[in-house]
Image (cartoon, helix red, strand yellow):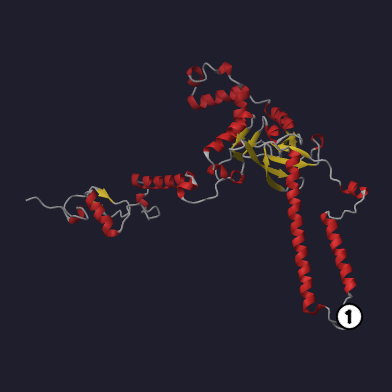
Amino acid sequence: MATEPPISQLCNVCHNQPPKYRCPRCTSVRTCSLPCYQRHQSRASCNGQRIETQYVKRSQLATPAGFDHDYNFLTKIERAIQSPATKRGEDDGERPAKRRRKGAVGGLERYCTQHSINLERAPEGFQRAKMNETTFFQRSKKVCWTVEWIDERKEKTSSTVLENMTLEEAYRVKDKERKKKERQKTETARNEDNNNHKNAASEGFESTVDGVPPQDASETESHTASVQKTVASIDGEDTATTPETISQVRKPALHFYLHVPRCLYQQPVVTALNGTATITECLRNRRVLEFPTVYVLPYPPESLPASFITEEKYKERLRQDYKDVDVAQIVRSVGATVGGKGTLDGGIFASQEDKLDEKAILEMLRRDIQA
């Protein structure tokens, strides 16, 4: 008579057959078939999903099962990050381009291709990618750019600019909106100050305090009028300005410079722009990282401060820095390191060594350094 196996070696549900499966969630439960596993789920209210944060013994980490557990957990996190917010049923603040229709994104790409604009994207989750609100309007077939403005004091502001607007017009509209907000803020503070004076007067402010007689009403009105006149002159509402005053407060001519992204030096690399040209004309044959950044400075190109460098000087400095670089020698060293001596003799560089484009390889090395 054959000996029966112990119950611990049988299915934990039917106790008739040896187990074949293990529950991913309840790792101690082993079953022999799908019906037994389903009965286990109904009894224990088990959903069959693995608990990623469950404690695992140290001896089980260096096993294939432990490796699969960690790999699946990391893969799940990666998929959750890469999947669109609409699929997860939430809004995690991704940039608007991710929520636009494919036609809108395709329209922006066609626009950039048509006007020779090299539009580069920032990595997912970067602040610049989240700030980008550049939109392509399907009906009018026009692009509305997000433009970052940086003034002489290094204060950053952003606004939306249609593709057919000139830089001067766009900056004037942005500056007008800024002044309007400042004026509204000043008026709000002024109204609050007037309300405080009225409340103080209603509480008996006009009564005599320590033998000091109350102020005359005409004196108070004249003082209030002088204050309002002063504030009005600050806000630019005083129309009694003379030509001499206008010449004194007249601002110097502003010059526009496009920031060149991803350069090797810490100094901002800029290129001069024509203020009367449209944003589309200014971006032609240029590189843009998500959206253009424009410096608005009172300095012409020949009088730029040392904290800036023009694109022409940047390229010249780059040529001086790399003039002694032997690109062919670098390629030979890389080939010998990767494939040994046979790499150049009979490998991929054997027939191309004399046809190497040194400028292209130098540009590739420069991009690698930037990355």
Residue sitting at x 63%, y 36%:
142
Answer left or right for 364 relative to 167.
left
Q: Residue furthest bottom?
A: 211
Please determine whether, in this image, residue 227 is positioned above or below residue 92.
below
Q: Residue 42 sits in which quadrant?
A: bottom left
The image shows residue 108 at horizontal and vertical percentages of 59, 35
Residue position marked by numbered label 1 in the rendering: 213
Circle 1: residue type: Pro
Task: Determine crowd level at label 1: few under 14, some 14-19, many 20+ residues with C-alpha closer than 10 A.
Answer: few
Element carrying mark 1: loop
The image shows residue 233 at horizontal and vertical percentages of 85, 56
The image shows residue 343 at horizontal and vertical percentages of 49, 21
Quarter of the picture holding the C terminus: top right
Q: Residue 44 sits in which quadrant?
A: bottom left
The image shows residue 220 at horizontal and vertical percentages of 87, 71
Residue sitting at x 65%, y 40%:
145
Residue sitting at x 37%, y 49%:
61
| 163, 54: nearer the viewer | 163
Answer left or right for 182 relative to 78.
right
